[in-house]
Image: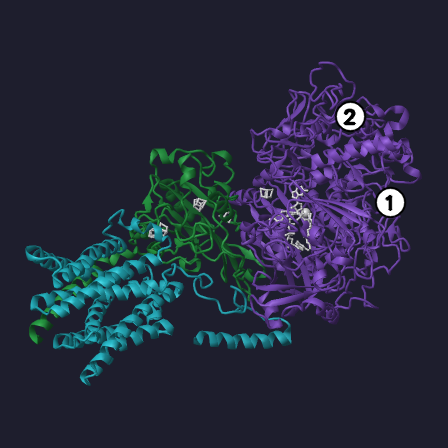
Chain colours: A purple, B green, C cyan
Amino acid sequence: MPGLGTSFGRGGATTAQQDLARSDCILIEGSSMAEAHPVGFRWVMKAKENGATIIHVDPRFSRTSALADIWVPIRAGSDIAFLGGIIRHVLENDLCFREYVVHYTNASCILRPEFRDSDEGATGYFSGWNEEKRAYNHESWLYEGEGLSYPKRDLSLQDARCVYQTLKRHFSRYTPEMVEQVCGIPPELFQKVADALTSASGPEKTAAICYAVGWTHHSKGVQVIRTAAILQLLLGNIGRPGGGIMALRGHASIQGSTDIPTLYDILPGYLSMPRAGKDEETLQDYLEKHTNRTGLWQQFPAYFVSLLKAYYGVRATSSNDFGYAWVPKITGDHSYFSFLYKMLDGEMEGMFLMGQNPAVGAQNARLERKALSRLKWLVVRDMVEIESAAFWYDSPEIERGELKTEEIETEVFFFPAAGHAEKEGAFTNTQRLLQWREKAVDPPGDCRSESWFIHRLALRLIEKAKASGEPNDEPLRALDWWYPETKDGEPEMEAVLAEINGWKTTPEVNATGSVFTHDRDGQLHHGPQIDEYEELKDDGTTASGCWIYCGVYASDGVNKALARQSNDYLGHGWGFAWPSDRRIIYNRASAAPNGKPWSERKKLVWWSAENKQWTGQDVVDFKKDKSPDYRPDGHARGLEALPGDAPFILHEDGLGWLYIPEGLQDGPLPTHYEPLESPVNNKLYERDTNPVENWFTREENRFAPPGDTRFPFVLTTYRLTEHHTAGGMSRFLPHLAELQPEMFVEISPEAAVGLGIKNTDYVCIVTLRGAIEVRALVSRRMRPLQLNGKTVHQVAIPFHWGSAGPIRGDVANDLMAISGEPNVTIMETKALVCNVVPGRRPRGKEFLPWLDSFAPQSGPAVLHPEQPPLGAPSGGKLESGHGQHGKSA
Amino acid sequence: MIGEGTQSTNQRKHSFAQDHVEVGFFTDPSVCIGCKACEVACKEWNEVPDDGFTWTGNSYDNTGHLGASTWRHVLFVEQDRTKGNQIAGPMSLGNDSEDPFRWIFLSDVCKHCENAGCLEACPTGSIVRTEVGSVLVQNDVCNGCGYCVVACPFGVIDRRPEPLPDAGGAFKCTFCYDRQKSGLTPACAKVCPTESIVFGRLDDLRARGAARVRTLQGQGYDDAQLYDPQETSVGGIHAFFLLLGEAEAYGLPPRPQIPTIYLKSSWAAAVVTAIGAIAAVGAAFSFFA
Amino acid sequence: MSADRNFEERLESWRKEAKHGGAVSGRGVNVAGGPIPRRPGYYGEAVVRPPVWTWEIPLYFFAGGAAGMAPLFACAGLFLGLTDLARAALWITAAGAIISPILLIMDLGRPRLFLNMLRVFKYQSPMSVGAWILAMFGTFAVPACIAFELHLHHVLSGSLDTFVAVVAEVLTFGAAYWGLGLATYTGVLIGATAIPAWFLHHVLLPIHFGTAGLGCAAAILELLGFQIRPLFFLGMFVATIETLLWLWLEFDKHGPADRALHAGGSGWLIRSGEILSGPLPIIFRLTNLVPLAAVSFLLGALLSRFGWIAAGRVSGKDPEAVFASQG
Ligand SMILES: Nc1nc2c(c(=O)[nH]1)N[C@H]1C(S)=C(S)[C@@H](COP(=O)(O)OP(=O)(O)OC[C@H]3O[C@@H](n4cnc5c(=O)[nH]c(N)nc54)[C@H](O)[C@@H]3O)O[C@H]1N2
Ligand SMILES: Nc1nc2c(c(=O)[nH]1)N[C@H]1C(S)=C(S)[C@@H](COP(=O)(O)OP(=O)(O)OC[C@H]3O[C@@H](n4cnc5c(=O)[nH]c(N)nc54)[C@H](O)[C@@H]3O)O[C@H]1N2
Ligand code: SF4
Ligand code: SF4
Ligand code: SF4
Ligand code: SF4
Ligand code: SF4
Ligand SMILES: [Mo]
């Protein structure tokens, strides 16, 4: 996430799950770790066994809460207010880890006089707001001094314009009373959490924070994570054992799919995707824009050119800008939701769907299924016939007569896919760990792996491009599609890994340190493997498919992702953690500025004066021989420009950023905004919602205004341990299906009594987008909250059901709205409003009129006042390029 | 304990079967996360069929109880009490609004009783005691008489109904006898992420269980106790549990008895009846003929 | 249950409170499953497994009881030279000896493996003991009947015929011996289980089943035309015992532990069975309605067997029964 990326430098969890066992306090918020990450949760239990305090902040009393020492019920979508309250507590009572904060963070950096905080006048807007474009100009957010590399600093933290003082002012109104009014958390309970966290801070102690999509699926998800980052920096918990922020990722390789992205706006290794337009027209323009003067990103050109060399091989030369012109340029928002609308409007003809089930998993799923029905062709590769492949003959819309099979023109090609045990490859898991997976069994029947499919497809496309001679097809012809094949016609997956690691491009006969030296045609293809990303060059002599993975398949010829002999508590010797097998990143911060461990109990890496190098329990995330007292001279560039006590080496100043001068669309400091749909107005600011939010305004994507009496309940969604996401991998398996066979809603006894329903009764959940039928699971695990004297009831639904497979249920996402958080275009699935209507929903044609009576589906509607009207710019980016800051979903 | 990795008794290879060592399970709900991995692993390894897709509304438990096609069962107990020193939201802050709440998970299984009702009852000799002290149903011998079903004081074993595969026979946990024979740990213990299920030597486990109860009590879990009815006729169980609170809430009989304890008086009544019958017939025909 | 009514009242007041205030204050709203009465134990789930036996088993108990006691009358007939009586009794014995195993096998989950019952003998298992008893009973009963018929029709002649007569007598004694076991072991069988309603009455059951078996055999003979004084008095005797057993059962109540015997459908089945085989036959006999008394007794015995199995099913499903039956 850019939340972590902008704060620390890299968009990945800062620590390893095993290391949680060394924590003194673990705050799990925005995740139900025990339910969604049960195996990793063992380390939380280990910490508990060792005496740590476990805190879970969640709207539901979940299986995670059941094991926590403290459960704090919170109103969905109010986490910034809660964490902000703790930050205020830390700042007001001087509880931060002062030495860490002064030396390792940008607390001392001085802001420009023209900077205006969202807190001033409680408007909720920062300086630079452009109402027309619904976006910020970020100029005024920068520091005083020489850019980001050499900001003006006041190490006494007294300057009124320094980050520390700004922070103090910014959060001054986030008092316990305010927390109570916004989040529904009583002050006594708030105090317990604040005490537990602050007492686990300092040289002897550390606290960790774990989160997942309970934080990210919000209209301000990045800023929630930013709030946690600020807190952890203030408490001195980053880069230290038992500390850190554990971003719990989703699918087995979600981290991998952002490192080597399936996203439209970054390239492997968090390199920004080139954009169409003047300032990125040539390679030089592009590199100039993205290369930092100081810090690790000074090497940007080496990473990027090496990537182009991996793409285009010998065809990428310095004379053709290494093929920069062949790289597609993005022209705007090409996120999934944008092309969903394009499908609806008939502007997009076809789609490949591989490993995704949007008819169930995507928001506003009714609209989604309609969009699929407007495609001309659709390729679905899956292991079972999921809803996204069956929508044209079996879906709620067909049942209700909204769509008719005979009128749907979409040609669906369903390809049986091989499952993960039936093919080899690597996963990159939640803690940046690459683990190689060997093939256990052959896939049944005609099932084939993705790599087989894409390899065959690529070969055919390249063949066609060669035959066509069209200039447009040049990028295809230019591809260096060299991969050797196994006897089954699969591309050699280890050869792909070798390419990702990177090599010297000049082929050498019998060179040591070379692997997969020959291409499919038997030609000598490349030179020896490289060992570290430091070796990458911008002159075309090196190639690397993803610079941060360098070292996974180095010149010793060992596939380190396949390593299976763990030899210490951090798991070194098992798999390979990027970068360079560091398990806890920024770990220079585990030692004091002078290079000595902060304490014996919390030592991790330290400076060994005899050997003149860093040593310890982890691979140091620093130049190995840079002494703590190293000071750069004013002209140094790159890493040379960072002093010996600057742990955050990706940042130009080597500091952890409490305040983000550049890189985020919605502000340098987290600000509490209400969810797009909320039962209340913003208590803290005039502005209710995130100003930069993309609402994807559309007739069929309506939002209820704040406090809409038609929708009095707060609605949130979550996962069950027993199922997996859109259900393709669990609903079809009887041993899982029987464990949670029916869709339900969790509801408090108080709300149930108010509604006159009993446990197991049928109820319907209604929002402005749709209605679904579920069973009521009444339990005191859901608590009504008191907000400012107003009782707010929350209800929670899992989202795993659909209309295919042995157990069927209504689709939770029929209720969700499409929206886009401004930095990562993620939807808000965790905080909406709804109504709960006792009884079952009508079937067939009677459904729509019934829905209309609760939630108007057409015609003029009462919309959210802050929602841009149809046709208006929906907000977002004036500026582009935050690839380096580690975007991921 | 958690985090011992391959050194944990749940993971390490062993030779208990060869060495005829009594083994057991110690199941500790204070670390169980209710993930049901044990339930699924058991079904997968032992090829136990699913037994229907019914939603119960009883917390997260849609399995209900142990049976012929459920050899592991995770209970979800919601109670209005506190768990140790847990602060469960504003309900347990200790002021007027005190309204405690807790949620406990416990993975239930065949107890592999020291004196096993099922084993004693079985007329075919299908149920036997193995070299590791577990109680095993030999599926190829069982004729489905159903007597073990009513003889188990814990309601564990059951006859599998049609139309499930292998219907008609009585089934229950095998203690993964097949795995143990080859030095592997039972599937359920192997997958348990938090080592709530601990597999190992029975004597070690009993010591460990007692220590765990002491630790928990020291940490404010006043109602922690072991459930291992050694003082009743069952004589102890090889798969024993730590309980928070009373046994009834977990569907466990508080003082289970092996059903054969009254066998003597019952047979005596039968003999008296038989003699009575002879006497009555004799008398009737002697005096009234 | 009155507890439920209380709860409903409280619920009603919460509904009102919720309607006015939007929420219900404080504690009291039930945790397990919300505003529904919490069921005892673990969501009211059964603690022990209810019996899987179906209609064959009570019928088997009935048939086995009558057949098991019948050879006693055959013996009496042989002693006193009442050949017809002996013959009829042996036919009842043989018929029961054939029907009983059929019923038993029909109820097995895997009938083809019924012989496995005779793989082992386990004295602690009433089922095993019973299987052997049944087998032995059959071994004696059917040949006894055949031998007696051979003798009656003088199929063989001379000393062979005498030999057959002796064999028939010996076999009849054997059948009577094993028959006593057959008629009573079924009570031991269900008494030695974890089903609270059964095991709490482990002494009553063999007496009840044995007595009923004896009465049934006598009643069938009466209905076959042997309305003789010994049978009349035996009929009075068993009906008296059944009446006493009924009173015993009515007084030996264990509260929730055996409420299945007293309440609900199963309770009424047992009660009607007891009345039909206890007080009613006495009245009928006193008013000289002997056939009616016999029919009433048979019906009663049959109903009560079904009643006991039904009660076992109810009791097995009732967690409170299990808890209450344990100290
Ligand atoms: N068993 C299982 N495991 C999974 C998955 C699965 O489907 N099944 N999915 C995988 C994937 S793809 C992902 S992304 C991860 C997700 O992992 P998690 O994020 O842990 O999963 P969720 O259950 O979606 O949401 C977490 C929790 O956030 C809470 N929550 C909702 N709104 C808010 C809020 O505003 N504030 C706070 N503090 N909490 C809130 C919910 O009540 C829920 O308990 O899990 C992965 N692991
Ligand atoms: N309301 C609500 N909606 C949500 C969320 C939420 O919390 N609330 N969470 C969101 C999140 S975090 C996520 S990640 C998405 C997930 O949503 P999706 O990605 O749409 O759902 P999945 O079910 O994970 O889809 C993966 C599919 O890939 C198939 N598959 C598995 N392995 C392979 C393979 O090797 N090859 C191929 N070709 N196919 C394979 C599976 O069978 C499955 O059908 O849902 C999102 N939707
Ligand atoms: S499903 Fe896989 S990744 Fe997820 S918790 Fe289980 S073992 Fe870990
Ligand atoms: S718990 Fe029941 S099934 Fe298991 S050994 Fe004991 S008596 Fe047998
Ligand atoms: S059902 Fe099978 S295992 Fe159970 S007692 Fe009968 S023969 Fe034995
Ligand atoms: S020991 Fe084996 S058979 Fe028994 S519950 Fe565990 S996995 Fe199932
Ligand atoms: S696998 Fe372990 S933690 Fe999961 S439910 Fe079973 S006993 Fe509990
Ligand atoms: Mo996800």
Residues flagged by tags 1 and 2 on a common chain: yes
Which kind of residue does numbered mark 2 sit on? Answer: Ala
Distance CA(mark 1)–CA(mark 2): 41 Å
- Closer to the camera in the image, A336 or A669: A336
Q: Quadrant of residue A742?
A: bottom right
Q: Quadrant of residue C317?
A: bottom left
Residue A128 percent across, percent down from the top left: 88, 50
Which kind of residue does numbered mark 1 sit on? Answer: Arg
- Outermost residue toward the top? A510
Give the crowd class for mark 2: few <14, some 14-19, many >=20 residues within 10 Å.
many
Residue A420 drawn above or below residue A819 = above
Residue underneath mark 2 = A543
Could you say whether the residue bearing mark 2 is in a helix, strand or loop? strand
Could you say whether the residue bearing mark 1 is in a helix, strand or loop? loop
* Disc 2: residue Cβ within 8 A of ligand 2's nearest atom: no
- Closer to the camera in the image, B223 or A42: A42
- Outermost residue toward the left? C159
- The chain ID associated with circle 2 is A
Residue C92 drawn above or below residue A885 = below
Which disc number belongs to residue A570?
Answer: none
> In this orientation, does residue A358 appear?
yes
Residue A800 percent across, percent down from the top left: 64, 54
Q: Image quadrant for the N terminus of chain C?
A: bottom left
- The chain ID associated with circle 1 is A
Which disc number belongs to residue A112?
Answer: 1
- Closer to the camera in the image, A33 or A266: A266
Q: Image quadrant for the C terminus of chain C?
A: bottom left
> In this orientation, does residue A831 appear?
no
Residue A458 drawn above or below residue A747 = above
